[in-house]
Amino acid sequence: MAEISAGIFFTFLSLGILSIFFSLRGGVFGTIFRLVSVILFFVISLILFGGYDVVINQTEFDGTWTNSTQYIIGNQYDSYATMSEPLAWVFLAIAIILSMLFLVDALRGYV
């Protein structure tokens, strides 16, 4: 399976959540932050729909090199027992709701 680093995934997630909080201010900057959060949550859902596993890779040296991989979301096998697809649907639903709120702001004239 394809893998994405947990640091990148959680950076996207935290930036998306922070931009949601900044979008609550309203006005032009609120609309911009809402659009940024829509894009970030769509990207997160596409990553998870694409079958990527969120992992932490560690390389240690104690006389010999050892690599260890800890799976946060998904597993190394192509099975349907992972939480990546339901989480992708949740992130996609959040992105759709935020995009509808962006359209409501656009119709009100905040854009």
Image (cartoon, grey):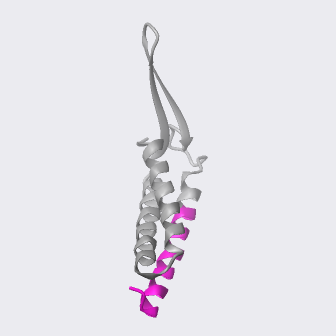
User: Is 98 drawn above or below residue 62 in the view shown?
Assistant: below
Please identify the dominant SS of the magenta region.
helix
Between 78 and 33, the one lying in front of the other is 33
Question: Viewed as shown, does residue 73 lie left or right of 59?
Answer: right
User: Is 69 drawn above or below residue 33 in the view shown?
Assistant: above
Residue located farthest toward the bottom when viewing the structure as drawn: 108
User: Is 19 drawn above or below residue 75 in the view shown?
Assistant: below
Check the picture and name the quadrant holding the N terminus. top left
Between 19 and 55, the one lying in front of the other is 19
Q: How many marks?
A: 0
User: Is 107 drawn above or below residue 25 in the view shown?
Assistant: below
Q: Which residues are magenta?
A: 89-111
Where in the figure is residue 53, as x and y percent of width and height?
48, 44
Tell me, yes or no, whether the highlighted magenta stretch contains residue 5.
no
Q: Residue at x 54, y 67 (%)?
A: 21
Between 72 and 22, the one lying in front of the other is 22
Q: Residue at x 59, y 58 (%)?
A: 86
Q: Residue at x 45, y 85 (%)?
A: 103
Where in the figure is residue 96, as x and y percent of width and height?
50, 74
Q: Residue at x 52, y 59 (%)?
A: 88
Where in the figure is residue 7, as x and y percent of width and height?
46, 43
Tell me, yes or no, whether the highlighted magenta stretch contains residue 99.
yes
Residue located farthest toward the top when viewing the structure as drawn: 63
Check the picture and name the quadrant holding the C terminus. bottom left
Where in the figure is residue 12, as x and y percent of width and height?
45, 54
